[in-house]
């Protein structure tokens, strides 16, 4: 066995010979990358030959060169791929946090591309020729759409909450219902955000019941703010009671205290007419009397990641002057995408047609059934007898910490290989170009067409067929 191992080691080609072999197969690549990957592959083969398992052998030097060169080409191909890549989302989760949440509309994508490749008036007032404010670019639109006096935008909603608390309540008390102490993605919690802001948390009420009198008893000279947090990512049902934003606003005005509502996922269009659960819109929250409202741009709004703040002009102006604002401000690309998204909401029916998040959430069952039938037919033709392929009824999810009780009837295409495992199929699909991500249930891969775009149906079929081969 020792002689076999030494014989295999002697057949491994040197680096220069491998580089000559792959020269016309990998395209233009930095020589340093090619050398490094070749060395890594050769080292891997040496470990395989000298390992505890049965020795790896080659019949000839030509065979050794061919196998090493093939491995190097594959490694170089993968190294050349960008780390941030396009992925086909067949999970049925519309706002999939791990897959980038909201897809931008065509208009928003065009706006981002234009801003990326051109100089812009980001902070230049074209009317006066002097320095301007980046917030002005969307402030008017936000005020128009929500009915608020003023608006500003930061990089995400957690930052918006942090900025508001830091500006209005640093060193003082903020009263919030115990049932609203939410945890958002990444295990970040409202109490932790509040602690970072320098404000002091005062919990009132019980987990399932909080009354107006609980707030009244907690108000004292140290109170700076009454905070309402919409439980957008969970629901407490049964024996419950919460103080509405309107009631809280009346109480705040009675004591001369500002009232802030953190909506998390902010709606500008009521989707309950499509069978989705009712969610308070930003406009309704402003009309209810909230002095400040914060919400995300990349969730139910369907735009880029952003934290949007609307409300009283004097409070927004104070936040703009907070030094923290510069650390959490958004760039021109986000502003371009957000402005284009907001403009669509001037005509709600247009928003439903053109903003992908809204279109996917409201897609009729018949449309989904046609898409699933097309995928089932195309995939069935490609895989033949290698797998069970059939369209089924199922349910999609909103995702993104929004609408936790929503039930979205959908159609999926189920795939179960006749040989090999579903786990192996899933792993192979993650290695595809582009990767295809579905969900596994009862040892079957489910491809939910709600989150697959029309032009992705044929691509998904090709990827599954290739992975099964």
Image: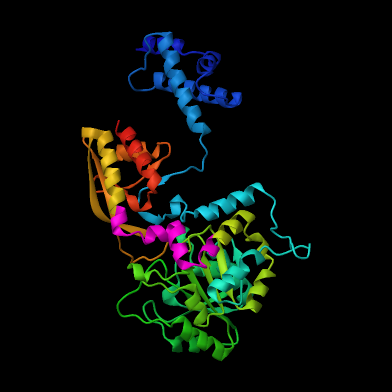
Instruction: Tell me the quadrant of the picture where the C terminus can be found.
Output: top left
In the picture provided, is 370 more to the left or to the right than 182?
left
Which residue reaches farthest bottom?
Answer: 254
For residue 389, what is the image quadrant?
top left
In the picture provided, is 265 more to the left or to the right than 166?
left
Q: Which residues are magenta?
A: 341-368
Name above or below for residue 190 compared with residue 83.
below
Q: Which residue sits at x=43%, y=83%?
A: 243
For residue 205, what is the image quadrant?
bottom left
Our reading of the magenta stretch's main secondary structure is helix
Q: Residue 91 in the image: x percent, y percent?
A: 35, 50
Given residues 352 and 305, the one toward you in this image is 352
Q: Residue 295 in the image: x percent, y percent?
A: 51, 68
Name above or below for residue 451 compared with residue 161.
above
Name above or below for residue 76 compared with residue 354.
above
Residue 344 belongs to the span the image colors magenta = yes
Q: Residue 110 in the image: x percent, y percent?
A: 56, 51
For residue 434, what is the image quadrant?
top left
Q: How is the image coloured?
A: rainbow
Q: Which residue sits at x=31%, y=55%?
A: 367
In the picture provided, is 64 more to the left or to the right than 198?
left
Given residues 411 and 78, the one toward you in this image is 411
Q: Which residue sits at x=57%, y=73%?
A: 144
Name above or below for residue 131 compared with residue 65.
below
Q: Which residue sits at x=45%, y=10%?
A: 10
């Amino acid at each position: 066995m020792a002689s076999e191992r030494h014989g295999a080691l002697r057949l491994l080609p040197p680096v220069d010979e491998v580089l000559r072999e792959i020269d016309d197969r990998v395209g233009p690549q930095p020589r340093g990358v090619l050398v490094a990957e070749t060395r890594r592959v050769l080292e891997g083969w040496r470990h395989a030959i000298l390992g505890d398992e049965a020795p790896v052998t080659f019949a000839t030097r030509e065979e050794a060169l061919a196998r090493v060169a093939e491995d190097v080409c594959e490694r170089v191909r993968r190294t050349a791929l960008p780390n941030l890549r396009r992925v086909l989302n067949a999970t049925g989760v519309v706002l999939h946090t791990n897959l980038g949440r909201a897809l931008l509309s065509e208009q928003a994508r065009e706006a981002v591309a234009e801003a990326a490749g051109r100089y812009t008036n980001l902070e230049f007032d074209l009317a006066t020729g002097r320095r301007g404010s980046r917030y002005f670019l969307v402030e008017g639109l936000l005020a128009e759409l929500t009915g608020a006096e003023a608006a500003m935008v930061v990089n995400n909603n957690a930052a918006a909450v942090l900025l508001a608390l830091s500006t209005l309540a640093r060193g003082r008390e903020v009263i919030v219902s115990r049932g609203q102490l939410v945890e958002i993605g990444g295990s970040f919690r409202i109490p932790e955000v509040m602690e970072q802001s320098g404000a002091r948390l005062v919990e009132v009420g019980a987990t399932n019941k909080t009354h107006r009198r609980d707030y009244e008893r907690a108000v004292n000279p140290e109170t700076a703010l009454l905070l309402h947090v919409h439980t957008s990512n969970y629901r407490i049902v049964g024996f419950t009671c919460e103080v509405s934003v309107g009631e809280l606003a009346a109480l705040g005005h009675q004591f001369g205290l500002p009232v802030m509502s953190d909506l998390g996922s902010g709606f500008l269009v009521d989707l309950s007419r499509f069978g989705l659960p009712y969610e308070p819109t930003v406009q309704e929250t402003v009309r209810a009397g909230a002095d400040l409202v914060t919400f995300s741009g990349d969730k139910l709004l369907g735009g880029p990641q952003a934290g949007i703040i609307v409300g009283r002009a004097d409070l927004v102006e104070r936040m703009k002057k907070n030094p923290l604002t510069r650390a959490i401000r958004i760039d021109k690309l986000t502003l371009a995408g957000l402005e284009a998204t907001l403009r669509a909401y001037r005509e709600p029916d247009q928003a439903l047609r053109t903003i992908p998040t809204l279109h996917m959430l409201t897609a009729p069952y018949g449309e989904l059934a046609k898409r699933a039938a097309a995928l089932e037919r195309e995939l069935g033709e490609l895989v033949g007898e290698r797998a069970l392929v059939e369209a089924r009824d199922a349910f999609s999810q909103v995702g993104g910490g929004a609408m936790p009780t929503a039930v979205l009837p959908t159609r999926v295409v189920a795939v179960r290989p006749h040989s090999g495992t579903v786990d192996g199929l899933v792993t192979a699909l993650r290695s595809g170009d582009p990767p295809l991500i579905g969900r596994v249930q009862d040892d079957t891969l489910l491809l939910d067409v709600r989150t697959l775009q029309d032009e992705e149906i044929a691509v998904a079929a090709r990827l599954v067929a290739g992975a099964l081969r």
